[in-house]
Image (tube, rainbow, N blue to C red):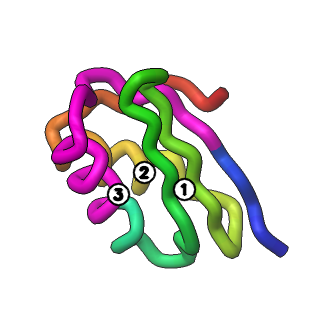
Amino acid sequence: MSTTTAFTVEGMSCGHCERTVTAELTALPGITDVTVDTRAGQVTIESAQPLDDDQVRSAVTGSGFILGVRI
């Protein structure tokens, strides 16, 4: 069973931002797909299991951005 979760992300503005966030998140266990929308300031994550918000937050902040709320 796949789970889809979306978050707001602050500070993304370009393709480099998108690639950086995507790389960090896809490295997490269980993540099967990541879609980043820099214009909307959102990231949508497909995973094989429910996400650990702390791991997602760590990956996004480690990329230099601010993870906001689930949407």
In the rendering, which numbered label is found on residue 68?
none
Q: CA distance from mark 1 to mark 2?
A: 6 Å
Q: Are marks 2 and 3 in contact (CB under 8 Å)?
A: no
Instruction: Give the left or right position of residue 43, taking residue 62 as reference.
Output: right
Density class for disc 1 (Cα within 10 Å; few <14, some 14-19, many ≥20) is: few
- Tell me the amino acid under the disc marked 1: Asp
Magenta residue span:
6-24
Quadrant in the picture for the C terminus: top right
| Image marks 1 and 2: residues in contact by CB distance under 8 Å | yes
Answer with the quarter of the image where residue 36 lies: top left
Which residue is most to the right? Answer: 1
| Front label number (3 vs 1) | 3
N-terminal-most mark, 3 or 1: 3
Magenta-drawn stretch contains 17: yes
Q: Residue at x 24, y 27 (%)?
A: 13
Q: CA distance from mark 3 to mark 1?
A: 16 Å
Relative to 9, does residue 45 appear above or below in the rendering?
below
Q: Secondary structure at mark 1?
A: loop
Label 3 is placed on what type of residue? Answer: Thr
Q: Which mark is residue 52?
A: 1
Left or right: 16 with respect to 30?
Answer: left
The picture places residue 3, in percent across and down from the top left corner, at: 75, 60
Kindly identify which residue carries mark 2: 56
Whether residues under marks 3 and 1 lie with C-beta atoms below 8 angstroms apart, the answer is no
Marks 2/3: CA–CA distance = 11 Å
Considering the numbered disc 2 on the image, is that residue within a helix, a strand or a loop?
A: helix
Q: Residue at x 37, y 31 (%)?
A: 38
Give the percent coordinates (x, y) of residue 68. Answer: 45, 24
Q: Residue at x 29, y 28 (%)?
A: 66
Residue that appears at 56% across and 76% down: 30
Task: Give the mark, 2 or 3, whose residue is nearer the N terminus.
Answer: 3
Q: Which residue is mark 3?
A: 22
